[in-house]
Image: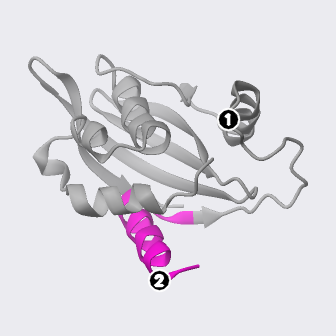
Amino acid sequence: MSVVTGLAAALAVSMWGESRDRADTSPTTSAPPTGTTTSVVVATERACAGLTAQTVTAGAGDTATVAGVIAAFEHAYYVTRSAEQALRLTSPQAGLAHEPLAAAITALPIGITHCVGVTSIAENTAEVHLVELHPDGRRFDYLQVINVSAVAPAGLVITNIQKRGS
């Protein structure tokens, strides 16, 4: 692992919460991602395997619901790979800066998939279980608490992301 990749990964872990590496040592049953819909669907299903929450998704999300804005942020981060789009879903009080966020996104391997489980625990707060599934089969789990608030006319935005105890 290069120093840049290692630093970006460390940054991502510190930003998004504690990583619990549960490396998937089972053989990969699908070919490495080739951009086809089938391989992406299989990888996404593997990323979502075992998640239990009120909402489990790797979809594009929306800004109308707590789960929707969290899903939209993760989609911008992992699928669109756009720091700009991700930051549009956060408020300044979230404390995210463009450069470190863009560096963390750039450090992600091509072909990574994700899935997020979101369970509301208060009107504007959710427990989140985020899964990264790397193309080589390694799985990283992040447990978080995320707060949101309404901002007109944008809808909901993320105001705080903190790691959740194991």
Front residue of this view, candidates 114 and 53:
114
> Is residue 18 magenta-colored?
yes
Q: Quadrant of the C terminus?
A: bottom right
Whichever of labels 1 and 2 marks the residue nearer the N terminus, that label is 2
Dominant SS of magenta comes to helix
Q: Is residue 3 visible?
A: yes
Where is residue 60? Give x, y as percent: 45, 24
SS for callout 1: helix
Report the residue at 15% width, 41% height from top: 91
Measured in 3D between alpha carbons, the distance from the residue under mark 1 to the one under mark 2, in whole angstroms, is 28 Å
Residue assigned mark 1: 44
Residue assigned mark 2: 3
Horizontal side of residue 117 vs 38, given as left or right: left
Front residue of this view, candidates 21 and 86:
86
Q: Is residue 96 visible?
A: no
Q: Residue furthest bottom?
A: 3
Horizontal side of residue 114 vs 76, given as left or right: right
Report the residue at 47% width, 42% height from top: 128
Horizontal side of residue 143 vs 148, given as left or right: right
Quadrant in the picture for residue 44: top right
Crowd class of label 1 (few under 14; some 14 to 19; many from 20; radius 10 Å): many
Horizontal side of residue 119 vs 132, given as left or right: left
> Is residue 4 magenta-colored?
yes
The disc label shown at residue 75, or none: none
Report the residue at 69% width, 33% height from top: 40
Q: What is the three-letter code of the residue carrying label 1?
A: Thr
Q: What residue span does the magenta drawing correspond to?
A: 1-19
Where is residue 144? Give x, y as percent: 43, 51
The answer to whether the residues at label 1 and label 2 have Cβ atoms under 8 Å apart is no
Residue 146 lies, with reference to residue 39, above or below; the image says below
- Total numbered circles: 2
